[in-house]
Image (cartoon, rainbow, N blue to C red):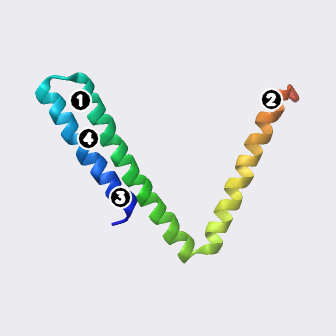
Amino acid sequence: METGKVEGKVKEIGGKLEQTAGDMLGDTGTQMAGTARELSGKAQQVWADLADVVRETTTERPFTALAIAAAAGFILGALRSATARDVRGDRDYR
């Protein structure tokens, strides 16, 4: 288990404990903070899992990963270019 996953699990458990303490004390703020910490921990675990998948995929299929990165760069460049034209007022209504 990697550091990101461990940290995420610790946050999740800490959030559950904080949420339980808020329930016992009747403190809504503590409950909400616990829920937020728990969700943050789960999100960190998902991010770590995603990073593992990307790392494995790029190791196993480097050319596929390169093609995906190039396509993503092309799409982001096209979107940025279109947004820049709209901001400048260079709209083409043909």
Query: In the displayed structure, would residue 45 be above or below residue 91?
Result: below
Q: Name which of mark 3 and mark 1 comes first in the sequence.
A: 3
Tags 4 and 3 in contact by the CB under 8 Å rule?
no
Spatial CA span between label 3 and label 2: 42 Å
Q: Name which of mark 4 and mark 1 comes first in the sequence.
A: 4
Residue 78: image quadrant is top right
Q: Residues within 10 Å of mark 3 (few under 14, many from 20)?
A: some
Q: Which one is closest to the eye, mark 2 or mark 4?
A: 4
Residue 5's disc is 3
The amino acid pointed to by label 2 is Asp
Residue 15's disc is 4
Q: Which one is closest to the eye, mark 1 or mark 2?
A: 1
Q: Name which of mark 2 and mark 4 comes first in the sequence.
A: 4
Q: Position of residue 66 (x, y in %)?
A: 66, 67
Looking at this rendering, what residue extends furthest in the bottom direction?
A: 60
Local secondary structure at mark 4: helix
Q: Is residue 42 left or right of residue 59?
A: left
Pointer 2: what residue? 86
Residue at 46% across, 58% down: 50
Q: Is residue 82 left or right of residue 56?
A: right
